[in-house]
Image (cartoon, coloured by chain):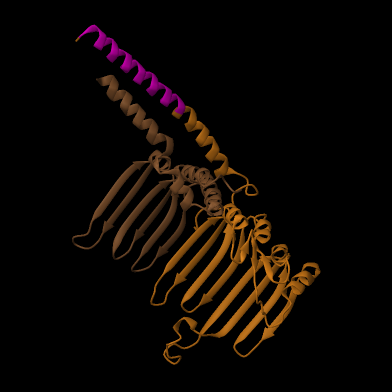
Chain colours: A brown, B orange
Amino acid sequence: MIGKILLGATMATAVVMKDGVIEVNVQEKRPDGSHVHLYLPGTVATWGVHLAPERRIAEHLRGKQQDLAIAHLALSELEKIPDADLVQVDSPKEHVNVAIRNGSLVVDVDDPGEKVHVRMPIRAARKVIEDLQADAGGPST
Amino acid sequence: MPASQTRRTILLAALALVASALLLVVLLRAAPAAQAAQAPAAAAAPSGAERWLHVKVDSTDDRDERVRVNVPLSLARTVLNSVQHGKLDHGVVHIDHIHMDDVDVRGIVKALKSAQDGEYVTVEKHDCTVHVSKQSGMLLIHVTDHGAAKHDRADADQSEHPRRHQNVDVRVPLEVADALFSGSSDELNVGAALDLLARHEKIELVSVKDGEQTVHIWMDTKTTQD
């Protein structure tokens, strides 16, 4: 039993370590507002692409090879850079922050309506784009 | 507990231990490599360090807005040079109708490149003064607008919102300006300009100041604006 637990824990750790963790936290500020907080292994994102019907993905991505190639280039560049705040917008009503933290793209938005926090491992995002490129007929560049 | 089940448990535990050990080995090997990869970036010689383009906007008007943008130049160059959409074609911006009061900017930049340091263009109007000069390979443009109107408030009464004083300073290395205008007359070669800009280590590019807003654009090797 202990062996199974250990094995499961090891495998789970390996999956999480491989592509990091996607975090989505959306909190509406009205009194009966919803609060969604999700943690997902980054690998799940790539599984999602593999699970979706290939033909449907190809249809949706027709003519988007260049966009995917640009996204892939941008993510590859972002992967190389150290922790940094890329964009900060502060006003009395709104706060927006886009940053790189430990290899993840972190987006924080705090406005009168809601508070949003998204953390996306760049490596996982790049792999998703690569899978989408393959489904869309291969990278264009 | 039957002997077969005990053997299975032991086998699973052993497997788990081996997997854990493998994972630890991988992580321990990866950690120094990652540190080594980060260390040169932090201590690298300025010439090899990543260049960052910084934009700082502070509004003191009723919006009271503060904007900070930090972009690695390599990211800007890579994306810009790969985009082909609308008027942007792999780093070249096509401009259909460029009217600069019939001023031949390309000609001026070319002439300034080979000229000595000094002030070359001065335009003085009742509400605006423009100075263009060359100093140590830099093209310096200073504009003082004595009556910048608030175009964003077309409906506002001018008497309520009096015209404001505005200072604009632009500093561009001449080779960068030359690269920017290196294409045909209806295009700007932004990609080539950024490539040459990246050769500089630290440079103040644009400064705009008026009563309600300051804009500052510069490039250096720091990831932050401190």
Based on the picture, tell me whether residue B109 belongs to the magenta stretch.
Answer: no
- B170 relative to B36 in the view: left or right: right
Give residue B223's position: percent from left, percent from top: 52, 53
Residue A133 horizontal/vertical position (percent)? 52, 46
Examine the rendering and report whether any part of residue B188 can be seen: yes
Residue stretch rendered in magenta on the structure: B2-26
Tell me if residue B131 comes above or below residue B69 in the rendering: below
Please give the name of the residue rendered at 49% of the width and 31% of the height, measured from the top-left corner.
Answer: B30
What residue is rendered at 60% in x and 81% in y? B144
Q: Is residue A12 above or below residue A129?
A: above
Q: Residue at coordinates 70% horizontally, 69% vertically from top-left?
A: B139
Quadrant of residue A112 in the image?
bottom left
Relative horizontal placement of residue B199, taking residue B217 as reference (left or right): right
Question: Where is residue A29 drawn, in percent x and y?
Answer: 24, 61
On the image, the x and y values in percent for residue B42 come to 55, 44
Can you tell which quarter of the image residue A51 is in? top left
User: Number of callouts in the render?
Assistant: 0
